[in-house]
């Protein structure tokens, strides 16, 4: 359940962007991502075939628009 936006109409995510805390968190996540990519590239490439196999059913479930084929008459 998503919390309701504040009185100014912005969610906590929108208010976090552009603040010093938001920049710090963004840079920390980016630095962690670069470190993990550099230090564990071999693990990443070893897991890549499995990640592709997992991505196929997820794309099938979430990429079809719940099988509503956007027909104008609703059939």
Image (cartoon, rainbow, N blue to C red):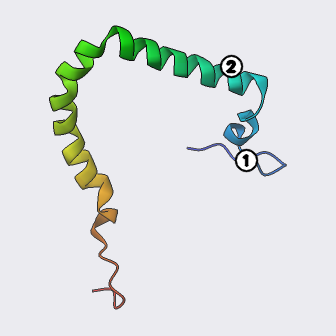
Q: Secondary structure at mark 2?
A: helix
Q: How many numbered markers are drawn?
A: 2
Residue at image x 68%, y 19%? 24
Disc on res. 41: none
Residue at image x 37%, y 17%? 37
- CA gap, disc 1 to disc 2? 23 Å
Residue 27's x, y, as percent?
Answer: 61, 21
The answer to which of marks 1 and 2 sits earlier in the sequence is 1
Residue 67's x, y, as percent?
Answer: 27, 68
Left or right relative to 66: residue 14: right
Left or right relative to 6: residue 29: left
Question: Vertical placement of 42 versus 70: above or below?
Answer: above
Question: Which of the 4 image quarters holds residue 68?
Answer: bottom left
Left or right relative to 4: residue 44: left
Question: Which of the 4 image quarters holds residue 42?
Answer: top left
Outermost residue toward the front? 38
The residue singled out by tag 2 in the image is: 24
Disc on res. 5: 1
Q: Residues within 10 Å of mark 1 (few under 14, many from 20)?
A: few
Residue at image x 73%, y 47%? 5
Question: Vertical placement of 38 versus 50: above or below?
Answer: above
Residue 44's x, y, as percent?
Answer: 26, 20
Question: Vertical placement of 5 versus 44: above or below?
Answer: below
Residue 55's x, y, as percent?
Answer: 24, 41
Q: Secondary structure at mark 1?
A: loop
Q: Quadrant of the C terminus?
A: bottom left
Question: Which of the 4 image quarters holds residue 11?
Answer: top right
Disc 1 versus disc 2: nearer the observer: 2
Residue at image x 84%, y 48%? 7
Q: Are marks 1 and 2 in contact (CB under 8 Å)?
A: no
């Amino acid at each position: 359940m998503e919390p309701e936006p504040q009185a100014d109409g912005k969610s906590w995510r929108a208010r976090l962007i552009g603040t010093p805390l938001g920049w710090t968190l963004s840079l920390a996540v980016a630095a962690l991502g670069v470190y993990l990519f550099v230090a564990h590239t071999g693990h990443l490439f070893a897991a890549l075939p499995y990640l592709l196999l997992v991505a196929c059913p997820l794309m099938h479930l979430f990429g079809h628009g719940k099988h509503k084929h956007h027909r104008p008459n609703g059939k």
